[in-house]
Amino acid sequence: MALKKIVYLPDPILRRKAKPITKFDTNLQKLIDDMIETMREAPGVGLAAPQIGLSQQLAVIEYAEEDENDDDETEKKPAKPKKLFVIINPEIIKASEETVVGVEGCLSLPGIVGEVERHESVQVKALNRHGKPVKIKADGWLARIFQHEIDHLNGLMYTEKATKLWKMQDDQEEDEEEIIE
Ligand code: NI
């Protein structure tokens, strides 16, 4: 496996609609593994192919859903295991009317975060790494990550949807887990 170089704004590839993937060969498997490694190394909770300079409909997402009863910080609970998703040619087929505003960042725009309104839950249709159709239901932060990554595949940066953008302070770095890449 090998780390890929992340591209940054204003690279025009980030504004281009990516092309569907039709070949599920060994080169694709290697590319997917490289993207997973690159996402983990960054670290980020998601990475779309245009972010490594490839205009292809492919994104990887890895995220541990938070515990719903996590308000009590004095009680340390083991973190939920992370779930890995590989989505190819994805499409949002259902989206909740309910929306939520949350803070997002992006590996292609380091040091900046912004508030973005997203659907609270979505249903995504995609192909997995072997070309098999899959349907994924996501809500909360995971739904936000899916929307952010699928936007990348449509040439959209979150900054175009953000109502507020600001520079991240150094002392906010530890909150990064709350922030999408
Ligand atoms: Ni991003």
Image (cartoon, helix red, strand yellow):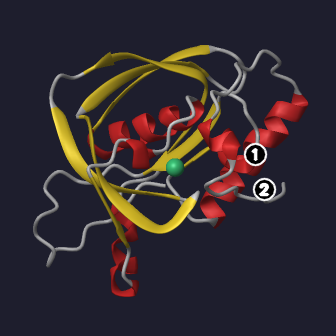
Label pair 1/2, CB-CB below 8 angstroms? yes
Residue 160, given in percent of the width and then of the height, sits at 41, 43
Location of residue 115 by image quarter: bottom left
Question: How far separated are the C-alphas under marks 1 and 2?
Answer: 9 Å
Q: Which mark is residue 53?
A: 1
Residue 171 versus residue 2: which sits nearer the camera? 171
Label 2 SS: loop
Question: Which residue is painted at 84% across and 41% down in the image?
Answer: 30
Residue 171 versus residue 157: which sits nearer the camera? 157
Location of residue 108 by image quarter: bottom right
Rate crowding at label 1 as few (under 14), some (14 to 19) or many (20 or more) other CA atoms within 10 Å: some
Residue on which the image places disc 2: 4
Residue 71, given in percent of the width and then of the height, sits at 11, 64
Horizontal placement of 150 versus 15: left or right? Answer: left
* Amino acid type of the residue tagged 2 in the rendering: Lys
Horizontal placement of 126 versus 102: left or right? Answer: right
Residue 7 versus residue 78: which sits nearer the camera? 7
Residue 4, given in percent of the width and then of the height, sits at 78, 56
Label 1 SS: loop
Can the viewer see residue 60 in this picture?
yes
Choose mark 1 or mark 2, whichever is in front.
1
Earlier sequence position, callout 1 versus callout 2: 2
Question: Which residue is painted at 68% across and 43% down in the image?
Answer: 12
Compared to residue 83, the image places residue 139 above or below, namely above
Compared to residue 34, the image places residue 172 above or below, namely below
Question: Which residue is painted at 50% across and 37% down in the image?
Answer: 156
Mark 2 lies within 8 Å of ligand 1 (Cβ measured): no
* Amino acid type of the residue tagged 1 in the rendering: Gly
Q: Which mark is residue 125?
A: none
Question: Which residue is painted at 40% across and 78% down in the image?
Answer: 173
